[in-house]
Image (cartoon, rainbow, N blue to C red):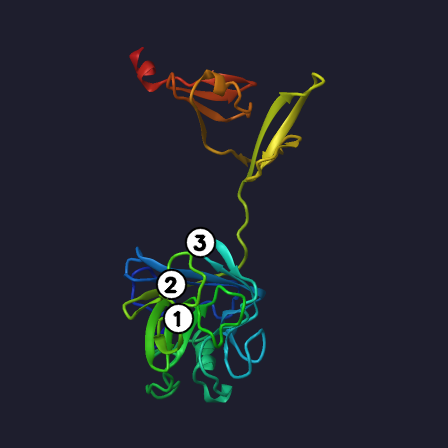
Amino acid sequence: MNIPSSNTTVEPFDDPQWSSAFGDISILDFRVQVAADKEYKQIKAHWSFRFKNKRPLKKLMMVNEGGCPYNLPGIGDISYVKNLMTEEISSTDFSCSVFGAYSHPSAMIGWTRMNSCLREECPYGFAYHHVIPIQVDFSGGFSFLAANNSGTTDGTTAFFGCDKGKCCACYGPVGGSGVYCGKECKAKNGGTVTKDAHAWFWVRLNPPQKVWEKCMEYRTEEENGDAAWYKLIGNRNTPVKGRCGKSEPILNDGIVVVPDNVTHNKVPQITGLLAYQKDVEVLHLRKNDAWKVMAEEEKVNAF
């Protein structure tokens, strides 16, 4: 709660701070990563919010809109929550990650002050008066709930921050989707509470874009004797007729490992594919409509 904000970016393993450098930039995702050590080798909770509409970071907190009720400000307008520990969408109905109790915007404390610190420098932190360095707020946290409800009364799946002066990180087992964290840093249903925790907060401006299209093609003979091309796109297991695009780079999967020559002859004839045959310890490369044996380093050096 006494973490300052400045207009510089946050550096790894530097003194903790919020950055107000992104206050006017519209963000799409807000991500929270919680660890039990400073080196972030023991990640205990990791999640992100995808917003329905991009908004400036300085308007991260809201009240009486975006699913956050009139008396509970927080992070709202959430399209879905992704649990990055499992890489799965954990909720599409989580309406508001409650930050703390309501205070009138003119008071410039709590959620309003947090937004202000994301817009401009706060040398003492959001919990302190904006003129006099006196702490005036004792709540402020980030959380998510895997179940499809608001989480404003039943607790949360993970939590980082302070609630009525009690500060902690709270989390459940990896992959868990229960309610593990109650009010005032109390564990529920087998959850874990610790005061020795650290957190990174990340923002994303735009969705990630593919650099390469994953596509593999091969030629085979139809029942009528005609040759035909088929392709495997992405992670699909069912091939479709046609060839991969030639104007863009494509990404093939790794090496196919086969036990013997009989199995090797059944491998799809995909250009650029590598196949390792275990019984003779030979690596094959599919090239120019034929399998070519890759030269072994020992044999090349022998000449």
Amino acid beneath label 1: Cys
Residue 2 visible to an observer of this rendering: no
Q: Position of residue 224 (x, y in %)?
A: 72, 18
User: Which amino acid, by three-letter code, is at mark 3?
Assistant: Thr
Residue 55, image x and y in percent? 56, 69
Percent position of residue 211, x then y: 53, 43
- Residue 172, label in figure: 2
- Contact? badges 1 and 3 (CB < 8 Å): no
Q: Is residue 191 above or below residue 117?
A: above
Residue type at mark 2 is: Gly
- Name the image quarter holding the N terminus: bottom left
Q: Please, is residue 99 above or below residue 222 in the view? A: below
Residue 125 is labelled as: none
Earlier in the chain: of badge 2 and badge 3, it is 3
Residues at marks 2 and 3 touching, judged by CB atoms closer than 8 Å: no
Label 2 sits on a secondary structure element that is loop
